[in-house]
Amino acid sequence: MALTHLGAKGEANMVDVGDKAETTRTAIAEGVVTMQPETLEMILAGDAKKGDVLGTARIAGIMAAKKTHELIPLCHPLLLTKVAVEIEPDRTLPGLRVTALARVTGKTGVEMEALTAASVACLTIYDMAKAADRGMVISGIRLVEKTGGKSGDYKVDA
């Protein structure tokens, strides 16, 4: 399979999506932040020194999705119709599971926007709680599902 962002000589190019059909495209990405049990309880109790960890991480993820084209070279600026970030505690980790959804009606997909939202939400959780637990680990950033577009649908094996 040829990489679409490379020209004939191997140079980086922005893909021309001008002739593509506009369709509704959705992507869901996820990530995990593992931490000490005490750190998770502190976050859930709202006792972090920097404030509301979950609310701030949710907003940071949404804002990041909207700026993906400024962060990732060759990404198209998109008029996103929906971005949602959910953060759920998982005491078995212990830690937080982040799920980000991005949607657009357009000519190119939103995988990078969903991945950026999940990544930045995880980074924000780390930033807001690092004073209590510098050993937190961000992992599992991945595309979970995508729909729409020429390449068809994708869903990770459960």
Image (cartoon, rainbow, N blue to C red):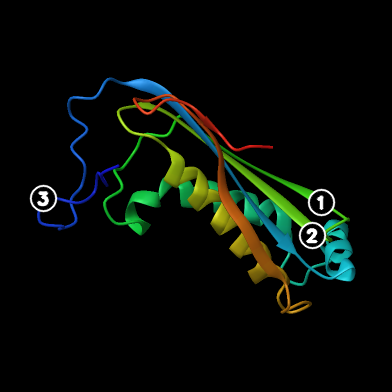
User: Considering the numbered disc 3 on the image, is that residue within a helix, a strand or a loop?
Assistant: loop
Contact, mark 2 vs mark 1 (Cβ under 8 Å): yes
- Residue visible at 84% across and 71% down? 36
Residue 99, image quadrant: top right
State the residue position of label 1.
89
- Residue visible at 77% across and 77% down? 133
State the residue position of label 3.
8
Which disc is residue 73 wearing? none
Callout count: 3
- Indicate the amino acid at tag 1: Pro
Which of these two is toward me, 59 or 84? 84
* Mark toward the start of the polypeptide (2 vs 1): 1
- Indicate the amino acid at tag 3: Ala
User: Considering the numbered disc 2 on the image, is that residue within a helix, a strand or a loop?
Assistant: strand
Q: Is residue 18 above or below residue 23?
A: below
Residue furthest to the left in view is 9
- Indicate the amino acid at tag 2: Gly
Kindly report the distance in space between the C-alpha atoms of the residues bearing marks 2 and 1: 6 Å
Q: Position of residue 145 (x, y in %)?
A: 55, 34
Q: For this view, does 15 lie left or right of residue 52?
A: left
Q: Position of residue 71 (x, y in %)?
A: 37, 58
Q: Nearer the viewer, mark 2 or mark 3?
A: 3
Mark 2 crowd level (few <14, some 14–19, many ≥20, 10 Å Cα): many
Kindly report the distance in space between the C-alpha atoms of the residues bearing marks 2 and 3: 45 Å
Mark 1 crowd level (few <14, some 14–19, many ≥20, 10 Å Cα): some
Which of these two is toward me, 105 or 19? 19
State the residue position of label 2.
95
Q: Is residue 103 above or below residue 56?
A: above
Residue 111, image quadrant: top left
